[in-house]
Image: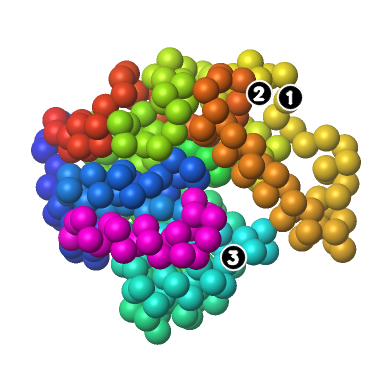
Amino acid sequence: MSKVDFQKAELCSMLGIKYPIIMAPMFLVSNVEMVVAGIEAGITGAIPALNYRTIEELRAAIHEIRTRVEGPFGINLIVNKSNFLYKEQLDLICEEKVDFIITSLGSPEETIKRAKKSGVKVFCDVTDVNYAKKVEALGADALIAVNKEAGGHAGNTSFQDLIPALQTACTIPIISAGGVGDYPSLSEMLSLGIAGVSVGTIFIASDEAGVSQEYKQACVDYTSKDIVMTTKLSGSRCSVINTPYLQKIGTEQNWLERILNKNKKLKKWFKAFTFYRGMKKLQTAAFGATYKTIWCAGPTVDYIHSIRPVKEIVKSLVNE
């Protein structure tokens, strides 16, 4: 295997980073400590805006990162109606001129318009060509190509199929999300000519992650064979660890949930309710000291063998 020249990857020049890696935004996992450690190690990171209950808490986190380290970082925005704080969060991000926004679960049209006026880049989560073409037409700066190996809200397509399809249909940079956990997998992904990668799961088992030791240890103990998809958390497919508790409650919405989710009048409100309820479950899971909870993770748990500092995880990604 030839050594990778990371600086040739477009994400490095776009953000001014040493390695073309985004520490992916993970609900209730990503925090200031992780992003600071990531920037110090030569990568960038993003935090979900919803990790903070109030706008002032989000503002304080942005200020703390900037006080402690110099380097780019981003905020992940849920841009559909389930996020009742969306407009306030977008206002703050544009006011603070955060380096980039990652949009998820909705139309990024308003986000892109507002961000461009403030000089903030917008990277949009996409899982298929049709949606990718739409966000490119809206003015997105890059695509986050979420493949079926991703943790959390994963796609349906392998990176081997998704990336070439996006490269044929679109002209903006592509950042691949899912399937990277060590140097060989990173090298393979970059060999496809993409701008960079978004990596999440392997950072859950980091010293800096603000979740329970049980959650971190589960990422060490379980394997890709234990990763399943559930629609119970947010109404969208989400990859989680198949713990005994998850086996008990099941992975599919029940008949009432399905009916409400399809009703045109009730749909948007039910989706918001489902998303909020699911997030509360995840909050309990992230900080509760028991395996009988719901923990998001992707198949790249196979690359996790111990709980380590973020800087060591980055080293394992970028060194042969």
In the image, is residue 316 above or below residue 124? above
Query: In the drawing, does residue 4 fall left or right of residue 165?
Result: left
| Picture coordinates of residue 123, whole percent (x, y) | 41, 63
Front label number (3 vs 1): 3
Q: Which residue is mark 2?
A: 246
Of the residues under marks 3 and 1, which one precedes in the sequence? 3
Callout 1: SS: helix
Check disc 1: other Cα within 10 Å, few if <14, some if 14-19, many if 20+: few
Q: Which residue is mark 3?
A: 85
Q: CA distance from mark 3 to mark 1?
A: 30 Å
Residue displayed at 14% across by 42% down: 4
Looking at numbered disc 1 in the image, what kind of residue is underneath it? Ile
Looking at numbered disc 3 in the image, what kind of residue is underneath it? Leu
Answer whether labels 1 and 2 touch (C-beta < 8 Å): yes
| Picture coordinates of residue 53, whole percent (x, y) | 54, 55
Scheme of colours in the image:
rainbow
Callout 3: SS: loop
Magenta: main secondary structure? helix
Q: Nearer the viewer, residue 99 or 109?
A: 99
Query: In the drawing, does residue 57 fall left or right of residue 97?
Result: right
Q: Which residues are magenta?
A: 49-70
| Picture coordinates of residue 113, whole percent (x, y) | 48, 80
Residue displayed at 38% across by 47% down: 31
Assign the N terminus to one quadrant of the image.
top left
Can you tell which quarter of the image residue 284 is in? top right
Residue displayed at 57% across by 67% down: 86
Q: Nearer the viewer, residue 289 or 105?
A: 289
| Picture coordinates of residue 114, whole percent (x, y) | 47, 80
Callout 2: SS: helix
Asked if residue 188 shows in the view, the reply is no
Check disc 3: other Cα within 10 Å, few if <14, some if 14-19, many if 20+: some
Mark number for residue 249? Answer: 1
